[in-house]
Amino acid sequence: MDKELVIVGGGPAGLSAAIYAARAGLDFIVLERDGFGGGQITSSHEVENYPGAGIRSGFDLGSAFREQAVALGAEIRYGAVSSVRDLGDEKELILDGGETIKAKAVIAATGASPKKLGVPGEKELTGRGVSWCATCDGAFFRGRDTLVIGGGDTAVEDALFLSNLCRSVTVALRRDVFRAARRRVDLLKAKDNVTILYKTNLTEIRGEDRVRSVILSGPEGAAERPVDGVFLAVGVEPASGWLEGLPLTLDGGYVAAGEDCRTGVPGVFAAGDLRKKPLRQVVTAAADGANAVTSVIEYLGRA
């Protein structure tokens, strides 16, 4: 199978790219390893920060992206890409089952997944009080009690953000010192509604319809703590392993690419959470998809 363009990833970046590719009349296909697509946004209980969408579930918003892309003629199929080879004017994608697809251009939009703790209740209560994005979901916990897990920059930024909305914020980190920038940590410590627990691990999240409490294990043993929301900030893992065969510039697994989404390999573009950038949100992912296809059109000489 030969295509002008293969979009790898069916989240907001990949589906936005599909919409623009369809409108441009490109011969393309979207490969999505999860079958349905929609990306991380589908696990959000409610989304209120995507312009024009109102307040709706992440599943509904992801479904709307997919439906619009399909309505415009996008072909979306299940396919997990294991590797890609640079053949010069063409790129060869090798799928997990051994099938190969050649394309003149590839948009890598496989995103980045938050690291999971694997504790009881984490999976079951995702979207019902368990979140990996304070800027996405923090507003739903205004005036309530929240817990942030982690000691890095993301955890501190999340806690600072939540401290302006929530009644209380507890920060639990497994070490006895933060890894985050000292200035931001000092700002956090100055907050009256923030409690910091060192050498503390989250061992269980409890609740049925939503988060009700957590079990924290610290120097004085295990104890139950009532909270309404749990924000996990223990790192993310960019899904860039399939690109390792290309001479790309990677920074912590993220692909270096500018706002035009061009990478250091001609014909390969990076969009969405996989791209190294300061803000990863559904709106910036969608913008990347549009920019990536604009660059693809120029690369193919179709402009």
Image (cartoon, grey):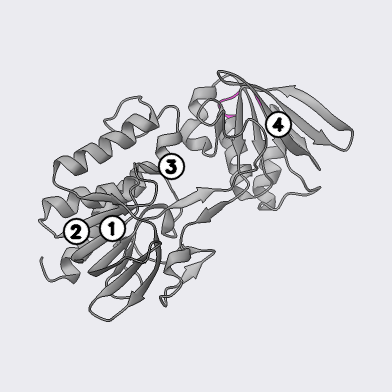
Which of marks 4 and 1 precedes in the sequence?
1
Q: Please give the label number shown on residue 40.
A: 3
- Which amino acid does the dot numbered 3 rest on? Gln
Residue 264 lies in the magenta stretch: no
Which of marks 3 and 4 precedes in the sequence?
3
Q: Please give the label number shown on residue 28.
A: 2
Q: Residue at x 42, y 53 (%)?
A: 111
Which of marks 4 and 2 precedes in the sequence?
2
Q: Please give the label number shown on residue 204.
A: 4
Q: Please give the label number shown on residue 7.
A: 1
User: Could you say which is closer to the camera, residue 221 or residue 34?
Assistant: 34
How many angstroms separate mark 2 from mark 1 (CA)?
A: 7 Å
Q: Residues within 10 Å of mark 1 (few under 14, many from 20)?
A: many
- Which amino acid does the dot numbered 4 rest on? Glu
Which of marks 1 and 2 precedes in the sequence?
1
> Which residue is at the far right?
220
Q: Residues within 10 Å of mark 4 (few under 14, many from 20)?
A: some
Q: Residue at x 35, y 53 (%)?
A: 9
Please state the extent of the stretch shown in magenta in the rendering. Answer: 163-168
Left or right of residue 226, residue 29 in this image: left
- Which amino acid does the dot numbered 1 rest on? Ile
Left or right of residue 186, residue 105 in this image: left
How many angstroms separate mark 1 from mark 4 (CA)?
A: 38 Å
Residue 166 lies in the magenta stretch: yes
Which is more foreground, mark 2 or mark 3?
A: 2
Q: Position of residue 134 (x, y in %)?
A: 53, 36
